[in-house]
Amino acid sequence: MRLEGALANAGSGLAAIAEGFGAISQNIANASTPDYAREVSATKDVTAGSQGMGTLALPTTRALDTAIQSQVLAQNATVGALSTSASALSTVAAAQGATGQSQDIASLLGKLGDAFSTLLNDPANATQQSAVVASAGTLASQINTLSNAYQQARQAAQDSIVADVTTLNTTLATIGRLSKQIVALKGAGQSTADLENQRDAAIDQAGQLGGIRFLGQPDGNVTAYTASGLSLPLDGSTMFATQPATLSAGSVYPTTIPAITLGGIDVTATLTSATGAGAIGANLTLRDQTLPTQQAELDEFAETLSTRFSAQGMTLFTDPAGHVPAPYGTPTQANYIGYAGTITVNPAVAANPSLVRDGTNAVAGSLIGASAFTPNPPGGPAGFTTLITRVLSYALGSDAQAGVGQPAAATTGLGPAGNLAAPYGPQPDLAGQASALVGAQAADAADAQAALTSAQSLQTALQTRLAAGSGVSIDTEMSTMIALQNAYGANAKVISAVQAMWNTLEQAVP
């Protein structure tokens, strides 16, 4: 072999080794970076006939099982959605209180019944009368607390949607920009491994935000579409848009809550899914279905509580103005949307606790409702028990009067638009309604957490499988680096030997 040939071979070897060191450096620096796939350098021996002509460094590629990667990305979106739901519902569950632990509304309703039972033994006892009012106040306050928790969680969902839509637009634009660079470099025969790792990180984020799916193309580009199949542009020409909004219990999409649009077209429904549409989809479901349903269930309980007490001559629960909202609107809850947030002890009763013995209003009586009742007049019997007995037997019971069942509380046609339904049927008494409500809402939180735990287990298993083939092992990288160092030394010796030969030849030539 000629000296220049040996020098060229060694030089090409050093260039290939430099590529290998570059890949190792990238791998070690990104060993803990999510979505990073190990970069692999490769070489090709160049020959002419039987004569070696050096080593050619091929474009650095990634060690990646794309099938498993697709499963991981999809599972990440599922976990993102479930995590959003579980977090919101756990906050509401904390405000609800555990069933039977004294602070949930079912327990507080039971304590109110106990207070009336105690008063029945001594109706003239002012301390016991005040205890009834205090117990009623505690129940009303807890109903307010729950209603506020729903509204805060719902507002947080709305605010997150607005922020996540902005982030999703930025992320999609980043994917589009990186894809253009990848296509150009692939066309020029250069490595795109670094850019593909950057793009995969953005793809993962887009999936977790909006459940966006991506399909790779032969030229290195990707196409994007939603979980429902809507194709998305990646050139920044068309973007998602929505507007901030301050929500109330009566706010409802699409009339009083802004839609999410793409190019001016409402695409809210395409981004909504139980699990697969990422954080945006989960927050849409929370905002428009789960939390409004829970609010509607509580509004129904608050209205039923107020109506059944008032029907027996004890208007104990009202709005701050002392009014009980009328039932049977169109839709059903039209007259008491958000009532749970304002329910309080009747100001007249709070000012005069003896009314819990005497009654607040006369009842005309009805064959299909409560029987007739006349309040204890001023100066009437101190031991008046008629009203207390009616409360214990009927307001808190399953009958409006002996042999006449209570009018059923609504469980369908709920909410501002009348399109929501409770997951339980009508209950015969207030205790059953409170227990069903507490149980159903606790189940919402428990189911969300159980689904999240299961999804995270699958996510971990998939990530482990992916990491086995594409993850960075520091031991492997160090072993490869040692091999490259040895090869570097060998090629350096060749260059040194060639240099020494040239020096000898130069000295030999006169």
Image (spheres, rainbow, N blue to C red):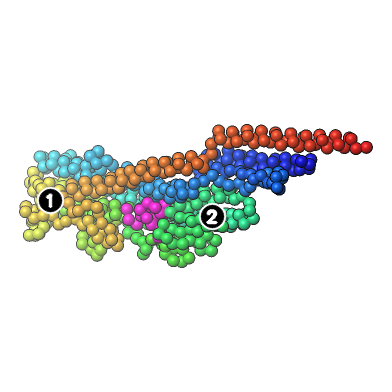
Which amino acid, by three-letter code, is at mark 2?
Ile
Which amino acid, by three-letter code, is at mark 1?
Ser
Q: Secondary structure at mark 1?
A: loop
Q: Which residues are magenta?
A: 270-290
Q: Is residue 166 visible?
A: no
> Which secondary structure type mostly characterizes the magenta part of the structure?
helix
Work out whether residue 370 or residue 313 is closer to the camera in this orientation and state it. 370
Direction right: furthest residue: 510
Q: CA distance from mark 1 to mark 2?
A: 61 Å
Work out whether residue 418 or residue 493 is closer to the camera in this orientation and state it. 493
Q: Which residue is mark 2?
A: 175
Is residue 283 located in the magenta-colored stretch of the structure?
yes
Tell me the residue at 48%/56% (across/down): 215
Q: Quadrant of residue 453?
A: top left
Is residue 243 located in the magenta-colored stretch of the structure?
no
Tell me the residue at 36%/64% (across/down): 255
Tell me the residue at 50%/59% (across/down): 223
Tell me the residue at 30%/47% (across/down): 444
Instruction: Give the image location of residue 120, x and y in percent.
Output: 11, 42
- Please give the count of numbered marks on the rendered protein: 2
Binning the other alpha carbons within 10 Å of mark 1 as few (below 14), some (14 to 19) or many (20 upward) gives: many
The numbered mark at residue 398 is 1
Indicate which label's residue lies in the foreground, 1 or 2.
Answer: 2
Binning the other alpha carbons within 10 Å of mark 2 as few (below 14), some (14 to 19) or many (20 upward) gives: many
Q: Is residue 218 left or right of residue 320?
A: right
Instruction: Give the image location of residue 175, x and y in percent.
Output: 54, 55
**Circles 1 and 2 in contact, beta carbons < 8 Å:** no
The answer to which of marks 1 and 2 sits earlier in the sequence is 2
Q: Secondary structure at mark 2?
A: helix
Q: Quadrant of residue 230?
A: bottom left
Direction bottom: furthest residue: 264
Image quarter hosting the C terminus: top right
